[in-house]
Image (spheres, grey):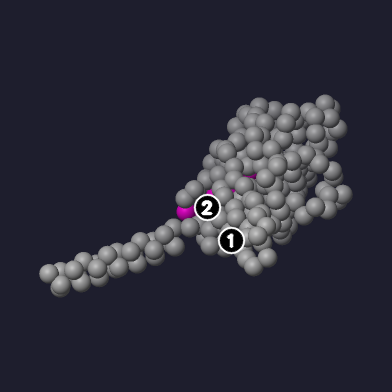
Amino acid sequence: MKNRLMFSLTLTLFLSGILLIQTADAVPKKGTLRISGDNTWVAFINGEEVAASGNWQVPTVSEFKLDKGFAQIAVYVHDAEPGAAGRGGFLADIILDDKPDYIGTGEDGWRCDTGKLLADRKDGWEKVDFDDSDWEDELEIYEQFGGGIWGFGAAIMEQILKDPECEANWVWCGPNDAEDDIYFRYTIGTLSVEPEDKLTTTWGALKSERR
């Protein structure tokens, strides 16, 4: 009876160890961020600028590594035609090497804010520890890639985007003929940092809790 109990305990510990290893290996380690913005955009990953462009038909493609499954995506998009004179748009997707392996604009988790020109904004909006809990979490969703007013540029964009096929939607923060300077954020994974503040993130939000 004692030997059987010891065997059961050993087996349980062994299986638990395998489960922990599998769980640790399950988080994504590498990612690709693909972006287009009408008209110009600047992209940051974990607070560092990784891409910028002024031609929405020429998307940027940025490779990045995740820290234990974590990365913070932040993108500024500027519509060059003021107000109702133009239509702003933001299209992005994130391809990861593990689940969730595809995240596109139009899905839950993206947050947005309207504001000043990028050069005039000094609140650290692109940083990992920025609190975006009061940002808008329901984006205005427009046509999927390949459709709508941006559809005529899809063939050119596909030559740069390549595989996988883009399934994202064009989005904006509110009506796309109103605000011209839009800020977007998306948090991948969970981050815990101490000692001063404990920063906790979920799939769609980053919140800072003072202890």
Q: Amino acid at mark 2?
A: Leu
SS of the residue at dot 1? loop
Q: What residue sits 83% from the left and 37% below the top?
A: 80
In the rendered view, tell whether residue 172 sits above or below residue 163. Answer: above
Q: Is residue 185 left or right of residue 202?
A: right
Q: Say whether residue 127 is visible.
A: yes
Residue for badge 1: 192
Q: What residue sits 72% from the left and 31% below the top?
A: 174
Q: Quadrant of residue 49?
A: bottom right
Image coordinates of residue 85 in percent, x first then y, are 84, 27
Q: Quadrant of residue 124?
A: bottom right
Q: Is residue 138 left or right of residue 15?
A: right
The residues tagged by marks 1 and 2 sit, at their Cα atoms, a distance apart of: 21 Å
Q: What residue sits 44% from the left and 62% below the top?
A: 24
Count of numbered circles in the view = 2
Image coordinates of residue 59 in percent, x first then y, are 68, 45
Of all residues, the one furthest to the left in this rendering is: 1
Nearest to viewer (mark 1 / mark 2): 1
Badges 1 and 2: C-beta atoms under 8 Å apart?
no
Image coordinates of residue 32 in percent, x first then y, are 59, 53
- In the image, the segment drawn in magenta is 91-98
Which of the pair 37/199 is nearer the observer?
199
- Dot 2: few (<14), some (14–19), or many (≥20) neighbours within 10 Å? many
On-image quarter of the N terminus: bottom left
Q: Say whether residue 59 is visible.
A: no
In the rendered view, tell whether residue 37 sits above or below residue 208. Answer: above
- Dot 1: few (<14), some (14–19), or many (≥20) neighbours within 10 Å? few
Residue for badge 2: 96
**Residue 97 magenta-drawn?**
yes
Q: Amino acid at mark 1?
A: Ser
**In terms of secondary structure, what is the magenta stretch mainly?**
strand
On-image quarter of the C terminus: bottom right
